[in-house]
Amino acid sequence: MRHLGVYYMLIACFMFAVTGAFAKYLSKDMPSIEVVFFRNLIGLVMIVYALYKKPAKQTGGHPWLLMFRGFVGTMALFAFFYNVAHISLGAAFTFSKTSPIFTAILAAIVFKERLGSLGWFAIFLGFGGILFIIQPNLGISKTDIIGIWSGLGAALAYTSVRELKKSYDTNTIVLSFMGWGTILPLIFMGLAEKFSYEPLDFLLSKFVLPNLSNVLLIVLMGITGLYFQINMTKAYAASRKAGTVAAVSYADVIFTIIIGTAMGDALPNAAAFFGIMLVILSGILVVREKK
């Protein structure tokens, strides 16, 4: 197929949207941080097995940066899953899709990358989109702040990966993320048994024993999450132009709006929908600028 990379990315986007749908449904019965725990626990088992079958070959030497990537990526994931549980799927995914915008800014600051006029235009366009989604005249909510962090935190994690790839095997980098993503929820759920603080309820939530149907959904969430990773990897491997595939990755926002509406989410109002489109356009322009 001529556009095999695009084909795989569309499948990946659909699988990611379905993973989010499972997470949203599970969040009705358990806190979002527990959903993160089970999602990462499944991934941790798989990555440990992969490293057992094929040990990593790497030079290492940056343990603190490796830990930073795992920690900040996990904190961004907490924010993303909290918003999946508390706002529409489309809005939650759109906030997370602001990461390329923040990544471009961080690359310009940290790595002194030159960003052309189109890139800066895309960044301003993206922030305009965020304003339309948040609609500050209606007040900035907790989920708005958490949503912005989900994009910024992911950008910090992605930026650190750029340096880590020079010294560490991909599986080792993923292991750091999955490890933090399994340990931190246990710590926060343990603290929640002793303390409570409403502004941090997206972190401090007590463990809820999942019922049998939820166990099935957790397994399905792990499977769709795995197929998302597989097809995303195939997409970049099959495409000669990474920028094209990265641009297509914004299709998951469209999928989540459709799936979220089917699950009972209200459609975004005109301003929010316009903002979503601006963020998508901004992200596409950024990745096309950096391809």
Image (spheres, grey):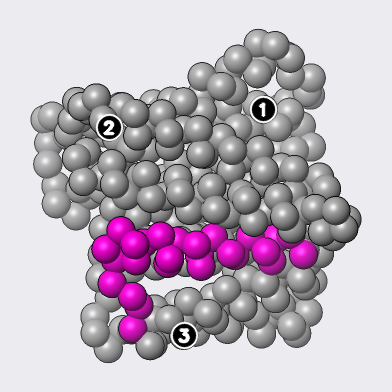
Residue 239, visible in the rendered structure: no
Residue bearing mark 2 = 214
Identify the amino acid type marked 2: Asn
Q: Residue 135 versus residue 89: which sits nearer the camera?
A: 89
The Cα–Cα distance between marks 2 and 1, rounded to whole angstroms, is 29 Å
Image coords of residue 11 (percent x, y)? 62, 51
Residue 192 lies in quadrant: top left
- Give, as a single range, the part of the protein colored magenta: 244-269
Residue 22, image x, y percentages: 37, 44
Q: Where does the image place residue 137, in percent across and percent down from the top left?
A: 27, 88
Circle 3 or circle 2, nearest the eye:
2
How far is the residue under mark 3 from the one under mark 2? 35 Å
Asked where in the image residue 100 lies, by quadrant, the reply is: bottom right
For residue 150, above or below residue 65: below
Q: 11 or 49: nearer the eye?
A: 11
Secondary structure found at label 3: helix
Q: Amino acid at mark 1?
A: Asn
Q: Are marks 1 and 3 in contact (CB under 8 Å)?
A: no
Q: Residue at x 53, y 79 (%)?
A: 277
Q: Earlier in the sequence, mark 3 or mark 2?
A: 2
Q: Badge 3: few (under 14), some or many (20 or more) residues near its Cα, within 10 Å?
A: some
Q: Is residue 217 above or below residue 85?
A: above
What amino acid is at disc 3? Answer: Phe
In screen coordinates, is 47 left or right of 128?
Answer: right
Q: Quadrant of the C terminus?
A: bottom right
Residue with the mark numbered 3: 274
Dot 2 or dot 1, earlier in sequence: 1
Sequence-earlier tag: 1 or 3? 1
Q: Secondary structure at mark 1?
A: helix
Instruction: Return the mark for residue 171.
Output: 1
